[in-house]
Amino acid sequence: MAAGLTWQACVTLLHAPHPYVGAVAALLIVEATVVRTVTAATRYAAGCLLGVAVAVPAALYVEPGMAGLALVVFASVLLARHEFLGHHGLHLPTTALITFALVRGRHPAELVDHLAEVMLGLAFGLACSALLFPAVRVRSAERALERLRSLLAHHLDGLADAVTGRGRPREVLGPAWRHELDTAVAEARTAVDEAHESVRWNVRPTARRRRWHLDRRVLRALADVEEQVCATGRLLDEKPLVSRAETPADAIDVVPRTEGFTQPYARLLRTTALCVYDCRGGRPHPALPAARHAVARLGRPGCDPSAARAEDRNLLHHLDAALTCLTASVPTPSRPPTRRHHALSTLRPTERR
């Protein structure tokens, strides 16, 4: 639509018989979000203006013409490699060569028409992207966060199964479970960034209502929990945590523990899974404060049960860090404004009705 409107406007206003330049410009800058379209239009316009700025002095003042052409090619290619222009830097040498040919051939009117077509294409591309139902990518971000929460809860339950004696985490969850978590975190980051980008400068009422719908603190908390879960899985893969009664007779690298640590730790992992699944930016799960208290009690020396080994303390450290991350995702309640009571002066009587 942007290309068609640009074509019709160029034919009507500029009397151009075949305004391909403007239509192509409109097609190249339209992106999925308004922010990306504005960025693409800015880079496209900057490339064209730099091409004109490089070519006009060379065409007017550099002799002979081949030397000016070589200078234009060298300078435009060098400037086109700047990271600000991105892939739109290709338009800089193209515009520079067209400008050099038109100015050198004494055709300034055609150069003005060329630049006018480009400007009309950029204007119609921006208008169509901003006004004709721009995308709001909130649902995809919600699905990505939901998948991340579900995976974390599932893997925490799997770690609890591994703790209670069903094998190592890679045997319970599969050899690629950490890679699945890393992929889910990366996809969630990308989806949340796209969602926030899609609501910026978006005129749709849906975008305005959902401007603060996705909280980045939730994503940061889930990513931090994922790091702690992976660290816990690595520790359990190296030295599985099973009870002394369930220790196999031929096991060499399996460290037996007493039931006093194994069962409470497994229950804490399952409780953490519930808290992770309920991490949505609002009120935390009711079991979160109790879980943190239980972790502190389990790791306190002299308590029954207690974490007597260094491996147990490392496991509790990662679990406590995960619960701390979940606590940090809870927004701090705002304090209501306090009313200030002004004391009446004793020397000035108040008006009575």
Image (cartoon, grey):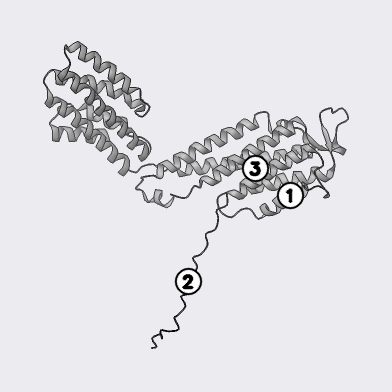
Residue 328 picture location, percent across and down: 59, 49
Q: Residue beneath label 3, please? A: 153
Quick one: quadrant of the C terminus?
A: bottom left
Q: Nearer the viewer, residue 108 or 54?
A: 54
Amino acid on which the number 1 mark rests in the picture: Ala
Residue 280 picture location, percent across and down: 56, 49
Amino acid on which the number 3 mark rests in the picture: Ala
Amino acid on which the number 2 mark rests in the picture: Arg
Cα separation between marks 3 and 1:
22 Å
N-terminal of the pair, mark 2 or mark 1, is: 1
Picture quarter containing residue 316?
A: top right
Quick one: quadrant of the N terminus?
A: top left
The numbered mark at residue 296 is: 1
N-terminal of the pair, mark 2 or mark 3, is: 3
Q: Nearer the viewer, residue 273 or 112?
A: 112
Is residue 278 in view from this perspective?
A: no
Cα separation between marks 2 and 3:
48 Å
Could you tell me which secondary element the residue under label 2 belongs to? loop
Could you tell me which secondary element the residue under label 1 belongs to? helix
Q: Residue beneath label 2, please? A: 340
Q: Is residue 285 above or below residue 30?
A: below
Picture quarter containing residue 31?
A: top left
From the viewer's perspective, is 224 left or right of 95?
right
